[in-house]
Image: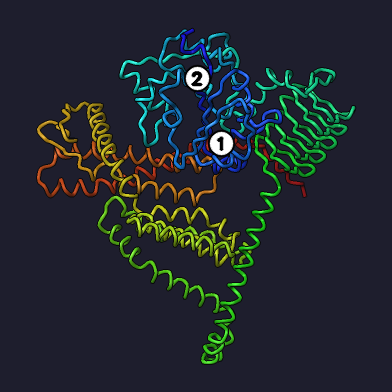
Amino acid sequence: MREEYARKPDIRAIILVGSRDFGRCPLAARLPTALWPVGGVLALERLLDHLADEGLRRVAICSSGDGPLLKRSIKVDDRLELEIFDEELPVGTAGSIGVAGDETDALLLVFSGSITCPPKIDTLIEAHREGQSDLTVVFNPGGAGENVFGEPAGIYVCETSILEYIPKEGYFDIKEGLIPKILRVGKTVYPAVLPSRAGNFRDRRGYLSGISDYLENVARDERGLSLYEERRSQTACGDGAQIDPGARVFGPVAVMKGARIARGAVVFGPTVIGRNVIINEDSVVVNSVLWDDSQIGADCELQRCVVDYHAIVRQGTSVEERSIPSAGQGVRAGLVGQGISRVGDMLSRRVQNALRPLIVGIRGRLPNWMQERTRSLLPWFGAGIILAAFIWSYWPGLTELWKIWRRSDEYSSGLLVPFLAVYVLWSRRHEIAKCPMGPSAWGLILFLGAQIFRLLGLYLLYGSAEMLSIVMSVAALVLLLFGWHVFRRVGTVLLFLCLMLPWPHRVQSAVSLPLQSWATSSAIFCLELMGYDVVPGGGNVIHIGDSSVAVAEACNGLRMITAFFVIGALVVLLVKRAWWEKLIVLVSSLPIALLCNTVRLALTAIAFTKLSGEHWEEIFHDFGGYAMMPLALAAVVAELWLLARLTTLPVQEEAIIITRQGD
């Protein structure tokens, strides 16, 4: 072992606590995964205790905005000198090493904060010494035997000499940034395999896998847990836990202090039942983790789930592959929704009271026959006012959209989208009429959000944001006037309206050149396939015979992509097929568009060798695109026919015997 590694106090441990996972897992959005419990102890706190037991003293924690929460949540061992670096913006794994590392350290050990079975420090140092490298990347063992690489363990051993290659600002990752950079300057990277899995995790599935590793390797040696003997398993059982003799527990299972498992309940490991957890009669829990003070009702079934603190699973519930948040979050969300609804109702009543004198005055001036129909005409009158206000507000954006439709070949198909949407709504009029209708206050919230989005687009000079707010405002008005039932019924049509908008300029610029190169290469391939002698030229030029055909940017296929997406989406809205068949039709619009554009370019190049005169060449070039429409429709029809043949069972025909009675 190197001399500078002999004294562990000279080694600094850096723990990376990633940002929260907003949007996918409700538990990860509320709590960083480093603060998820492992056997009753937070994963980060368990790692800190392990480092202190291994003789390390200097530890740094790098977080992305959760520093105050970490300070309040964990108990720091007195043997550690702990620093917490809280970065407002993510700096990446290598960036965190640059922030927390010090060139005076002998060695840097980098750990993921979400880990259930941290390895021994001597094992890591020995592996780094054997590799004689500047950076050691640690892997979990594979399933085929020793020294077989599995998934990365989220652990790195670094020489302090690599700190000079980490930028001081910005985002910098180890795998994508640091490793390629140090390899280019001649540094070495060594892969090492742990003797057992570290149990690192980033989400619910990884957490359950890490808990399995913990139960297999660590839980049996935990202080305060004793082995509970069950017929075919061994279960770690905390003091005060109550397991009814009629319950069945098949390990590995850890039952923490104060937990109760009722008669008839069945628990299959690997599972952790937290403190004061209650599992009622005849419930089944399989490969799950139940955090402290949660309750499982009778006749429930949980498979591969994580249950939050104080969460309550109602009687008869069956849940699989989910994270179950506590009831308090749902109650708070419900109170927020009720509050918004009350505010919407209050505003609605105030508007009605303010407009009532005006409506009465207008009604008195109307003819008698019109006064009798005022009640039926009033909603249409209000809708007309809202429509007029909408057009007035968005008139500059609508006129700009009209100009784009007229002057741009790529987005000229967008002109048809509003009319096609009206046709789809008309075809669904009977289904829409059956939906309960009523105003929804959530539409007002969505409308305000659309206006904020529009304001940001105007402030940041993003024209595409302002145009997208047109569709958002239409959706908000539908929700505001007609309610959730109608909104869900016409939701796909509202998404269809997005196809009338031009792509953002950055997106169009990013795809134009690749599409142009693809169009040129694919056309050359088709011409060579037909036996023509083709010579590719520079600048997307095709030399065929004595003629030269330039594939301009306008011929890159973007026009066909936008047009065929409109066609494919319209077919999806009109046909009655399974959702996955509609998805196939919609996704296939892209390859069909590229194929048709390739055919058009190949035929145009052949025509230029046969036709003479700019007049004929211009006519063939301009109308060649329209000729591809029947080809695209034929491809879509053939696709639907093939799907029907593959998914529809043949009808078995039976002979019908007809007899006629004699006179």
Q: Compared to 255, does 6 lie above or below?
A: above
User: 123 or 460: which is nearer to us?
Assistant: 123
Q: Amino acid at mark 1?
A: Thr
Provide residue 233's location: percent of width, then percent of height: 79, 18
For label 1, count other residues whose C-alpha is less than 10 Å away and answer few (under 14), some (14-19) or many (20+): few
Q: In the rendered view, does 310 fall on the left or right side of 158?
A: right
Q: How many marks?
A: 2
Q: Is residue 124 above or below residue 400?
A: above
Q: Which residue is disc 1 drawn over?
A: 647
Residue 389 at least partly seen: yes
Judge by depth and name the residue closer to the eye, 248 or 416: 248
Q: Residues within 10 Å of mark 2 (few under 14, many from 20)?
A: many
Q: Residue at 42% of width from left, 42% of height from top?
A: 636
Residue corresponding to mark 2: 11
Q: Which amino acid is tagged 2?
A: Ile
Whole-percent x, y for residue 433 in the image: 59, 64
- Give the percent coordinates (x, y) of residue 327: 71, 47
Choose between 391 and 419: the one closer to the eye.
Answer: 391
Q: Residue at left 71%, top 24%?
A: 270
